[in-house]
Amino acid sequence: MTKQQANWSPYDNNGGTCVAIAGANYCVIAADTRMSTGYNILTRDYSKIIQLADKSVMASSGFQADVRALQKVLAARHLIYQHQHNKQMSCPAMAQLLSNTLYYKRFFPYYAFNVLGGLDNEGKGCVFTYDAVGSYERVGYSSQGSGATLITPFLDNQLKSPSPLLLPAKDAVTPLSESEAIDLVKTCFASATERDIYTGDKVEIVILNASGIRREYMELRKD
Amino acid sequence: MNLADSTPAMNSLLGSEADSQRTLYPYVTGTSVVGIKYKDGILLAADMGGSYGSTLRYKTVERLKPVGKHSIIGASGEISDFQEIMRYLDELILYDNMWDDGNSLGPKEVHNYLTRVMYNRRNKFNPLWNSLVLGGVKNGQKYLGTVNMIGVHYEDNHVATGFGNHLARPILRDEWHENLTFEEGVKLLEKCMRVLLYRDRSAVNKLQIAKITEAGVTISQPYSLKTFWDFSAFKNPTVGAEGSW
């Protein structure tokens, strides 16, 4: 009789999709609100987006318990930063912190797929995209999660971001206006919802610009 | 054979005498818990069964318990782990009371505490093998949440664990609405528990319903549901189905 092995997994995939688009003076970060496990929907109204600092908003999909723990760690670190430096963390600084936090658990990773969006020190939109162990890159737009494979090619076509290899470096931010970008995001989610079973219910869209932060919601198909 | 899995690092994860210190599988388990928000507060339902594998061994297990002044907890999964969770919660409430500052932990705080406990145990690969429902009312605010053994948690207007997710949630999605009266809420829960009784083999026909409102907690005396076994579909389950067993 062979020894009984553990028959549980410390990970689960709770699904969902995240998107972020950087503009000249704004940033749009969006995620659906569906939380699933296997073929079940657990809840239709769970936010995957958190505002970490004045000008940094993170959207994460993947294993919800890890996502929540990651959000708490970053929020706590930001609080300490504020106590020590008497100012808010900039978005590029938060980007580095997130990368380091993810790599810290390189050998038992946070199963979280993140996009960090916000405004950089010049007020320009910035988007950083990550893998589960902290590899990251600043880009003009990004999508992560279960619907990313459906959304990214569409965004590539619509936003035509220049290659990061070009010299002189070309601006990655989109020339689209804020309302055009929001519309594009809504289209992305409506399309992804059609074909990805883990995406749907509602999309939460957060817009960061010079005047502050605001939220919009759009209903999606519930099937 | 030299495998990466036999390195000292992996040994402690995959199997060694350290295993006798970690939970590998559950022994005595409770089945579904179902919870809903209603007009005055929260209603939780759970049967009183404790299964030992496929044997329905214990039939007077109380799986619904009050926590402090403002919350009730319902547990499914390993009963001994639930008993340990109750020890953790009793200590939590005790320390909260010892502050004697007029403040008391609400359901949101207790749910957050439980989530952290479950997640931390999962991180150490020694989980508490439970799915918990935590409901309560404080200062007029109703709260209903759930957390499972790997730390996945959420709140909603209706929640369920285990089989309840498959059988009860669809009924609740169709028939739950804001401001259910107490009678409507109980009827809805009984409908869910009846379906679970018919279709979950670890369900027993002896259940309790717990109610929590601003005024306090009431856990009903155990009672049984009326069942009807004369459905023609139950009598001739394979009629019309080709190649059925």
Image (cartoon, helix red, strand yellow):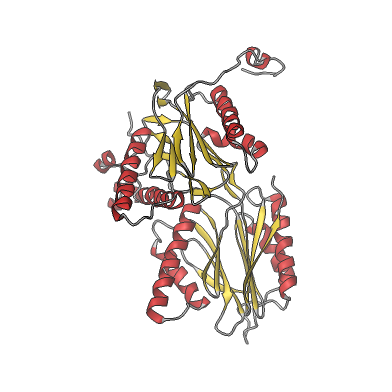
Where, by quadrant of the figure, is residue B79 drawn? top left
Q: Residue furthest left?
A: B17
Q: x%, y% of residue A111? A: 48, 56
- Residue B199 appears in view: yes
Q: Please say if B102 is above or below B231.
A: below
Q: x%, y% of residue A147? A: 64, 56
Q: Nearer the viewer, residue B206 or B106?
A: B106
Q: Nearer the viewer, residue A167 or B212?
A: B212
The residue at 33%/48% (across/down) is: B93
| Quadrant housing the N terminus of chain A | top left
The residue at 63%/16% (across/down) is: B234
Q: Please say if B35 is above or below B124.
A: above
| Quadrant housing the C terminus of chain A | top right
Q: Please say if A17 is above or below B63.
A: below
The residue at 33%/39% (across/down) is: B23
Q: x%, y% of residue B184? A: 62, 33
Locate residue A67 relative to residue B53 in the image: left or right. right
The residue at 26%/43% (across/down) is: B18
Where, by quadrant of the figure, is residue A156 drawn? bottom right
Locate residue B157 relative to residue A183 in the image: left or right. left
